[in-house]
Amino acid sequence: MHSDLQTRRRVLLVTYRRYLEAERALTLARQEMKGWFPAAARPGETAIGQPGSRIRRVYDRRERAILQLAAAKEKLEIARVRLAARRPAPLQLIWVR
């Protein structure tokens, strides 16, 4: 594999792991947040908290991770296309008898 593609792939894997960690942190923070409210008055799954709150910081970190993951995927695809355009066309062998 070309070194540029290897680098882009590593970046994609790192950003994917960051996204998974951020997603897990948000899920845990939401579960913890629900523990503060009575069962009848619990906020929904879409609660993201007030600006500056812990839940909002975790939510924002997850959003940044999603954007970084999307950017890494796009850059990997661009590198693949660029590398494919740079490669010469494969030789076609013609057998003559």
Image (tube, grey):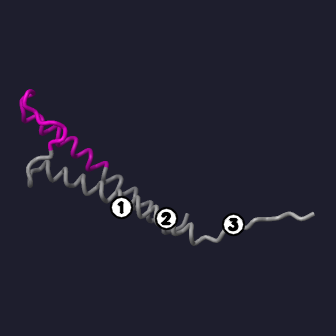
Say few, some or many: other residues with alpha carbon within 10 Å of mark 1 (under 14 / 14 to 19 / 20 or more).
Answer: some
Q: Earlier in the sequence, mark 2 or mark 3?
A: 2
Examine the structure image and report whether residue 30 is included in the region drawn in magenta.
yes
Q: Magenta segment range?
A: 20-47
Residue denoted by label 1 = 71
Residue denoted by label 3 = 90
Label 1 is placed on what type of residue?
Answer: Ala
Say few, some or many: other residues with alpha carbon within 10 Å of mark 3 (under 14 / 14 to 19 / 20 or more).
Answer: few
- Mark 2 secondary-structure assignment: helix
Residue 84 in the image: state x and y as whole percent: 56, 66
- Rounded to the nearest angstrom, the CA distance separating label 2 from label 3 is 20 Å
Label 2 is placed on what type of residue?
Answer: Leu
Q: How many numbered discs sit on the rendered protein?
A: 3
Residue 1 in the image: state x and y as whole percent: 55, 63
42 or 16, nearer to the observer: 42
Q: Is 24 displayed left or right of 92 in the figure?
A: left
Tell which tag, 2 or 3, sits nearer the viewer: 3
Residue at 15%, 42% (x, y): give it. Answer: 47
- Mark 1 secondary-structure assignment: helix
Q: Is 36 displayed left or right of 57 in the figure?
A: left
Secondary structure mainly formed by the magenta segment:
helix
Residue denoted by label 2 = 5
69 or 3, nearer to the observer: 69
Label 3 is placed on what type of residue?
Answer: Pro
